[in-house]
């Protein structure tokens, strides 16, 4: 099942690269998955569990934390920078709940990721 999602994701990326059409990322920060508010042991939010709790996503979160430490920012900022640093045009919908979250997202827009960092976050490296 997961392998089918990965294949579809890779196909979608190739399509956006080939056509140049932008991706409109509705949940660009994964509903707060990368915020640190969630843990693999806490399964009380059934929607988050169903949508985001997978071994691969927990590894992505771990890598986002590592990269955030290197870049002196937060994992949630890395998640938004990831969406904005694709090989095709993207637009990210954000959902800040307060001024601090808005400022965090604005700052994240300025974080530059290398192609190898994006691949690493994508579990390709």
Image (cartoon, rainbow, N blue to C red):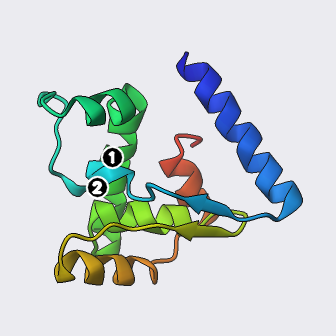
SS for dot 2: helix
Q: Residue at x 19, y 83 (%)?
A: 99
Percent position (x, y) of residue 8?
69, 32
Viewer-proximal residue, 101 or 114? 101
Splitting the image into 4 quarters, where does residue 52 fall?
Answer: top left
Label 1, label 2: how far apart the Cα atoms are: 6 Å
Position of 31 relative to 11 (above/below): below
Q: Is residue 27 left or right of residue 11?
A: left
Q: Are marks 1 and 2 in contact (CB under 8 Å)?
A: yes
Q: Residue at x 38, y 58 (%)?
A: 29
The residue tagged 1 is 61
Q: For the image shown, how many numbered marks are present on the structure?
A: 2
Residue 65 bears which disc, if any? Answer: 2
SS for dot 1: helix
Q: Give the quadrant of the C terminus.
A: top right
Q: Residues within 10 Å of mark 2 (few under 14, many from 20)?
A: many
Splitting the image into 4 quarters, where does residue 100 fall?
Answer: bottom left
Q: Residue at x 60, y 28 (%)?
A: 5
Percent position (x, y) of residue 74?
26, 67
């Amino acid at each position: 099942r997961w392998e089918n999602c990965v294949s579809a994701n890779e196909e979608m990326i190739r399509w956006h690269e080939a056509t140049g059409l932008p991706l409109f990322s509705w949940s660009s920060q994964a509903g707060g998955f990368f915020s640190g508010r969630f843990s693999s042991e806490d399964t009380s939010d059934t929607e988050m569990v169903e949508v985001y709790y997978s071994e691969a996503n927990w590894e992505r979160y771990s890598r986002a934390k590592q990269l955030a430490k290197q870049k002196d920012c937060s994992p949630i900022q890395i998640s938004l920078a990831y969406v904005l640093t694709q090989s095709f045009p993207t637009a990210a919908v954000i959902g800040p709940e307060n001024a601090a979250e808005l400022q965090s997202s604005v700052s994240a827009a300025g974080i530059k990721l290398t192609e190898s960092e994006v691949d690493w976050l994508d579990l390709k490296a």
